[in-house]
Structures are given as C-alpha cells and as structure tokens.
Image (cartoon, rainbow, N blue to C red):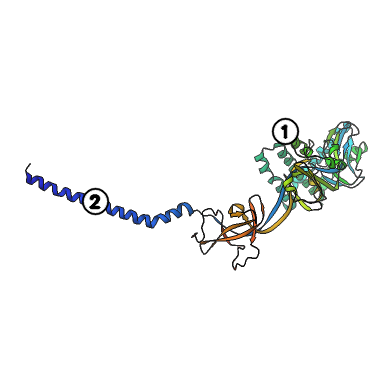
Amino acid sequence: MSTKDKGTQGKPRKKLVRKKQQKGGVARVLLVIFALLYLPALWNCLFHGSIETDILDTGLLEMKISSQGVFIREEIAVAAPKDGIIIPRVSSSERVPSRYDYAMLIDETSSLTLQKIEDLEEDIIRQVAESYPNSLEQHPEFREQVQNEASKLSSLAAQKDLPSIQSIKSALERLLYNRNKEVFQGQADRLYLQNEKDELEKLKQNLNQNAMMIRASFSGLVVWDDQNADIKYLPENMGNLTPDDLILKDSDKQNTAEENRGSLGLIRAEEAFTVKKDQTFARLVNNEKSWYVCCVDNKKAGRIQNGNALSLKVDGLEGLIPGMVESVQPMGDETVVTVSFNRMVEKTVHLRHVSADLIVENIEGLKIPVRSLANRNIHDNTADVILVRLNRAVIKRVVVVAEQDTFAVIDTLAGSSETDPVSAFDIYVVNPKNIEEGQVID
C-alpha cells in the first residue's frame, strides 16, 4: 500500500472520533437538564406521592379501663325434691312473680303421657305452619329476632366455638316453635284442629293431676342451670374477694367458658328434662340489683372514685350496662372495684367470670388517629396537626384533650388568637412524617 493511500484512509477516522465526542457531550448536557427538571418531581413521587389525607370530624371517645371480675347476685339454687321429669312453664331468664308456679315435677311413669303431649302439639303446629305459610313473613319483630341470632354465627364460626353455635341453633328453633304456636293460638278459623286441641287439653289435665308444682319464693328471674351456688360469690361475702378470686389463670379459662354456658343450655317453656333427687336444676335470681366486682391496674384506678357513674362493656355481650361505683379498695399491685347495676340483669345471669371494660367517661370533640399527631409534648399535652389548605401543608399546634387506644380528641390551644384554627371538616395528613410547612400536597 502507498503513502498516499495511507493518508487518504487516516482522515475519515479523525472525523469519526470527533463526531463521537460531540455526541457524548450532547448526551451529558441532556442528562444534566433531565436531572434538573425531573429529579425533584421523581423525589416527590417516591417519598411524597402517596400522602394519605382524611377529613377531620367530631366523634365520641370512650375512656375505658380493662378489668377482670365476677358477677355477684342474690340468688338461690333450686334442687329436685325427688327423681322425675321437670316441665318448665317459663323460658330461661324469664321473670316470674312471687309464689308463681314456674315448673312442675312429674314421675317418670308419666313420661308416656308427656311424649303423647309433645307429639300431638308438634303435629298441630306443623299443620298450622303448612296452612299459613306466609304468617311468619308478616311479623317484622320475629324476622328481627331471627336476624339477631343469625348475625352471631359468623363470629362464632371464625372462633370455632361449636357449643355456642349449638345454643344459637336451639334459640332459632325456639323462636320458630313459639311463633308457630302464636299463629295457631291467634287463628280464628281453627275448627279443623278442634278435636286435636281438645285431646291435647285432656292430656295436659291428666298430667297436671299427678304433678308437683315448683313455686317461686320471691319475684325474680328463673335460670335453668345445674351449677351449684358458690358461697364465696354471695353478696354478703363479696367484700372478702381478693384479686386471686377475680383474675382467671389461663388454665382456668376453658373451664370458665363451660361454666358460663351451663350444661342445661337454653331451656324453653314446656321443654322437659330429667332430674335426680337433690340435683340442682334451676336458680331463682333477684333482678332488682346485681354487682360486678373486678380487678384493675393501680395506675388506672385513680380515675375511678366511689359514687362515680360508669358503664360496663362486657366481652361477648351487646350494649352497655349502666352502673354505680360502690367501693374502691387498693390491694397490692391491683385495685378491687365494686360496681352495682339494676338494668340488663337478665343479660348477665348466665355469667360468672368475665372480662369487661369500665367506661368511666365519654369525651366528644375533634377525633383524630394518634399516629396523625407530630412533635408531641407529654408535659403540656400538645402536638402538631398538619392540615391541607389550598393544596399546601399548614402546621397547627393543638392540645390533646384525651387519648384512648389509637384515637385522640384534640382542641385549639387555650388563649390562641388564630383566625383560622383547626376545626371540623378540615383536611389533615394521616401520616405527617417528613412533611414540611408549605409543601405542595395534591
């Protein structure tokens, strides 16, 4: 190859290198421009793009104290005077007046007559249900009762509490039975069943002639239960209860669950069961007044004073039981509190050991999650709340009025002269971490 050829081949190579250098410089310039323009937006997207906000609203905060304790009531255990069959005249937890015959005891020899009564009554009710298929749909109260029982099934199924599921089944059967019976008794046109009804009345009269009546010694609630009364939990002895009597050990919780259920379950009127002599089969409970004696932590017991009105929220029971504090007794690391109540006694007659919240106060105000408070000061109970106004973060200093679990009630600072303080329907940042004053929030 000649020198001329070599020179000709060298020139294009220099131009190619020069073009590559120019392209590399342009790329660097574009990269710098991209960084200046888009990195802030990328940073905001990564760290502030998922800012959660909510609307501040008023709400009720229940100030509660957890406790473990027992229910105390004036009650007597009823034992069978002899072997036989008990036929209840009232359902469990039903109130009866003094000297009322709430059950009868028949000999086992009368069991054949009893079986004939049950078969004939079921046949009559079946015929009524078939003749009036739409009678149940016309009673909203019955539908509501059925719905209340059925709504309990989901939670019990999740807990795999089979005995309680069986009790709901019994309750639904009792509701259906009583409703059909009411339909039969309320139908004016029932001549086609008159013969069966007359026969049923004769059988019942024969049964009553050979029966021993069980009479209430005072007005109260009848509870079908085979649990013997524990002297320790009588009203006259509740002042001697210690934390060991009130706080359950883990090993005893299963036994207590069985104790609270009772082996007789939910007995309905005319649902017969056999008994042995001296066997406890029922309790007669005075429903005028009951007590809840419980144990609470000493640090929280300072919020409870003798004579205070409060409410009980018992685990497993719907609704609140209003009560009055009768005594507060410190005992070592725990404090024993006695609360009396005279309402919803029938809801508690099947319970002894329970866990319950003592709701000592209800505070209404601006309710906000505790995690939405920033820069908290435990000495003066103040904190920052970040509001969103005109798409920008605005920090407001507030006072924490009360706090329970994961929520708090807040208010404006005393003596504040702000013209636009925090108020209901303000939009606030749920998680205020890394949020600065004036930051744009979409």
One can see residue 139 in this view: no
Q: CA distance from mark 1 to mark 2?
A: 81 Å
Give 246 or 215, whichever is nearer the viewer: 246
Q: Residue 301, position in %: x, y?
A: 75, 48
- Residue 50 vertical position relative to residue 271 in the rendered view, above or below: below
Q: Residue 75, position in %: x, y?
A: 86, 42
In the rendered image, which residue does mark 1 sit on?
Answer: 251
Task: Please give the label number shown on residue 438.
Answer: none
Q: Quadrant of the N terminus?
A: top left
Tell me the SS state at disc 2. Answer: helix
In the rendered image, which residue does mark 2 sit on?
Answer: 21
Left or right, residue 367 beside residue 194 = left
The reply to whether dot 1 and dot 2 touch (C-beta < 8 Å) is: no
Q: Which residue sits furthest front?
A: 379
Which residue is at a point 67% across and 37% down the rendered structure image?
160
Which residue is at a point 70% across and 37% down the rendered structure image?
162
Q: Quadrant of residue 238?
A: top right
Crowd tier of the residue under label 1, counting other residues whose Cα lies within 10 Å: few below 14, some 14–19, many 20 or above: few
Q: Residue 143, position in %: x, y?
A: 72, 50
Tell me the SS state at disc 1. Answer: helix
Left or right, residue 51 beside residue 398 = left
Q: Amino acid at mark 2?
A: Gln
